[in-house]
Amino acid sequence: MTTSSRSLIRRLAPYFSARLRQNSRLLSSSSALRESQLSSLESPSSATDAVHLTENCVRRMKELQADEGTEKLLRLSIEAGGCSGFQYNFLLDDKTNDDDRVFEQDGVRLVMIYFFDFVKGATVDYVEELIRSAFQVFLL
């Protein structure tokens, strides 16, 4: 990534953070998380900024890893757009980069680059609905 791209990201980060905070209520209102799942995610104050993975997310990642036969990482990226101002994209990846932030829970790793301030303290869940199944980000 070029220096100008990094500079642009750093300049836009406060704007996106503010927009994300404004829309967090909207995002969490569409949540399929049950209160029991939320209470199981409570963590010590030193880890309040961490990105948490639900049991459903960990279970699905382990299923995907078993299907692939190799350890895969769940990579999260954020793009401007979508009905709430941001679109979260998930990708199965084989490796981490030097500048990735890595979050691990029960042997499953979530990696992301540059976007940590947008999802600090969030929860990643795997939601199965009648019309689709997907990993989703929930801001609490």
Image (spheres, helix red, strand yellow):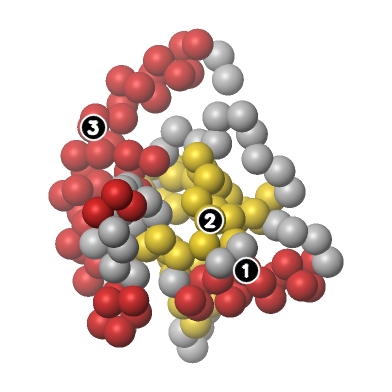
Foreground residue, 124 or 19?
124
Q: Residue 118 in the image: x percent, y percent? A: 33, 43
Residue positioned most to the bottom: 130
Q: Residues within 10 Å of mark 1 (few under 14, many from 20)?
A: many
Residue positioned most to the right: 69
Mark 3 vs 2, N-terminal side: 3
125 to 113, vertically: above or below: below
| Residue 21 shows in the view | yes
Q: Mark 3 points at which residue?
A: 15
Q: Residue 63 in the image: x percent, y percent? A: 69, 76
Q: Mark 2 points at which residue?
A: 104
Mark 2 vs 1, N-terminal side: 1
Question: In the visual, does 1 lie left or right of 23?
Answer: right
Tell me the element at label 2.
strand
Classify residue 66 by image quadrant: bottom right
79 to 109, vertically: above or below: above
Using the numbered discs, state the Cα–Cα distance from disc 3 to disc 1 in whole angstroms: 32 Å
Q: Residue 135 in the image: x percent, y percent? A: 50, 67
Residue type highlighted by circle 2: Glu
State the mark number for residue 37.
Answer: none
Using the numbered discs, state the Cα–Cα distance from disc 2 to disc 1 in whole angstroms: 12 Å
Residue ID at (44%, 53%)? 88
Q: Residues within 10 Å of mark 2 (few under 14, many from 20)?
A: some
State the mark number for residue 61.
Answer: 1
- Eye-nearest disc, 2 or 1: 2
